[in-house]
Amino acid sequence: MKVLLLKDPKDDDSGQDPYIQELGSRGFEATLIPVLSFEFLSLQSFSEKLCHPEAYGGLVFTSPRAVEAMELCLERDNKQEVWKKSLKEKWHVKPAYVVGQATASLVRKIGLAAEGEKCGNGEKLAEYICSLCRHRSNHSPSHGQRGNPCELHGGEALPSRLGCRPPEGAAAREPIQLWGCLGLRPHWLRPGPARGDR
């Protein structure tokens, strides 16, 4: 049986989307149709901030798209060499909090140590970060801000929880919207000539 799979393609270790593999193993012939398109935003601002790790206490990646935006900044502004020689080491000593396993994997690929991946969602990650901030502020205050490469549609749990008054000595947060979502319409729904005009 043929089925339409309406989702963003994701490759696993075998190079094939796991949904297509699973459906195939159950006798379905799946055709993948991406229904969303993404546009990266604020890359110039993010790129400038990446060059000043001394001003921040860490990073919060709320999605794999945020990591893609970071990679794009480094590629687009020819900062890959600077990243390898100095910036990666300076950011590596700071926490890189993540939402989810996929984001954690990408963060590790760019040379940063991911924290909080098992929290599962923004609200639980916010609780985790707040508890660490309280613990760390009792021992050695953190300096600087935590950059927050975030998504537009990621829900308000993480920003609202981290945006509340931080414990004394904890870092403030500075969100950066890095991508937005553009809806794609299937070709049969796109405007075209009226039936009588054909």
Image: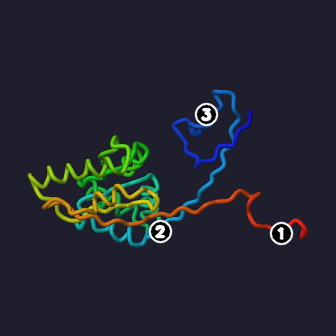
Q: Name the mark nearer the viewer: 3 or 1.
A: 1
- What residue is rendered at 14% in x and 52% in y? 136
* Identity of the residue furthest to the left in this view: 139
- Which amino acid, mark 1? Pro
Q: Where is residue 119 in the image (x, y as percent from the top left)?
A: 33, 43
Q: In front: 19, or 111?
A: 19
Give the spatial CA distance, label 3 vs label 2: 33 Å
Check disc 1 and report the residue beneath it.
193
Q: In front: 22, or 108?
A: 22
- Which amino acid, mark 3? Gln
Mark 1: few/some/many CA within 10 Å (<14, 14-19, 20+): few
Check disc 3 and report the residue beneath it.
21
Give the spatial CA distance, label 3 vs label 1: 39 Å
Image quadrant occupied by the N terminus: top right
Mark 2 vs 1, N-terminal side? 2
* Identity of the residue furthest to the top in this view: 26
Check disc 2 and report the residue beneath it.
41
- What residue is rendered at 83% in x and 69% in y? 193
Q: Where is residue 118 in the image (x, y as percent from the top left)?
A: 34, 40
- What residue is rendered at 29% in x and 52% in y? 126
Q: In front: 59, or 190?
A: 190
Give the spatial CA distance, label 2 vs label 1: 33 Å
Q: Position of residue 89 (x, y in %)?
A: 27, 56
Q: In this view, does 14 lie to the left or right of 96?
A: right
- What residue is rendered at 13% in x and 61% in y? 168
Q: State which quadrant residue 185 falls in.
A: bottom right
Q: In this view, does 196 lie to the left or right of 166?
A: right
Q: Position of residue 37 (x, y in %)?
A: 58, 59
Mark 3 vs 2, N-terminal side? 3
